[in-house]
Amino acid sequence: MINTETTALTDSLGRPIRDLRISVIDRCNFRCVYCMPKEKFGSNHRFLPNEKILSYDEIEKIARQFVALGVKKIRLTGGEPLVRPKLPELVNRLAKLPGLEDISLTTNGSLLTRENAQQLKDAGLNRITISLDALDDATFMAINDVKFPVQQVLDAIENTNTVGFDSIKINMVVKKGINEHSVLPMAEFFRGTGH
């Protein structure tokens, strides 16, 4: 149990801790070569059983304690957080915490339909980070290793934009010999979009 009588959380240098990252699930539908390669996370890999994953009640309780200690921003991650059922419900619960100023989500975009994006926004999500490691299918599919097409992630970015998210961050992991040739095309593609 966290002692909420303490005035604030600080790091080892005495700086206040304002950001909290919460992983809502350990599973992902991609097998990115830099994150969850098939060699380690193949069909025989044992992910946490459902009863070992924090419930939304438990996440809300922990978040409430951290907000009482000065946390202002929460980032929801995974695995792939959109694999977790009813994620907008959790966002809505967190958005009601007094003192919490910002809730963001990091996703690979594969499940980010326009409907899902709207539900997340309506629930109180402020910002989204979408992972995109290349713009060409060959490179993108080689990285995600499940043959997922890049256009569907580009559609997810557009879905997020369409429902009115002001802050859409594109996250690219650059690996030498794999996708460093994609850096300039990525910068050019998003130039002027605000993303």
Image: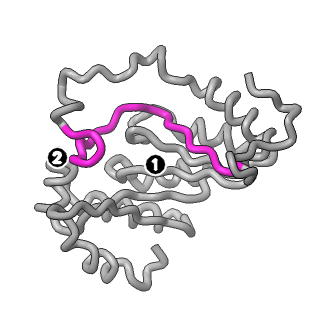
Q: Position of residue 135 (x, y in %)?
A: 23, 68
**For numbered disc 2, what is the local secondary structure?**
loop
Examine the rendered structure and indicate whether residue 121 appears above or below residue 163: above
Residue of label 1: 116
**How many dots with numbers?**
2
Q: Give the residue displayed 68% in from the left and 30% down from the top.
A: 62
Taking the image as shown, residue 32 lies to the left or right of residue 83, namely left
Examine the rendered structure and indicate whether residue 113 appears above or below residue 93: below
Q: Give the residue displayed 48% in from the left and 53% down from the top.
A: 117
Quadrant where the image shows the C terminus? bottom left
Taking the image as shown, residue 126 lies to the left or right of residue 157, namely right
**For numbered disc 1, what is the local secondary structure?**
helix
- Colouring convention used in this rendered image of the protein: one colour
**Which residue type carries mark 2?**
Asp
Q: Give the residue displayed 63% in from the left and 24% down from the top.
A: 58
Tag in front: 1 or 2: 2
- Residue numbers of the magenta segment: 17-37
Examine the rendered structure and indicate whether residue 102 appears above or below residue 88: below
Q: Position of residue 69 (x, y in %)?
A: 79, 40
Q: Give the residue displayed 27% in from the left and 39% down from the top.
A: 36
**Which residue type carries mark 1?**
Asn
Residue of label 2: 145
Q: Position of residue 23 (x, y in %)?
A: 50, 37
Taking the image as shown, residue 55 lies to the left or right of residue 179, namely right
Q: Quadrant of residue 134?
A: bottom left
Q: Nearer the viewer, residue 29 or 121?
A: 29
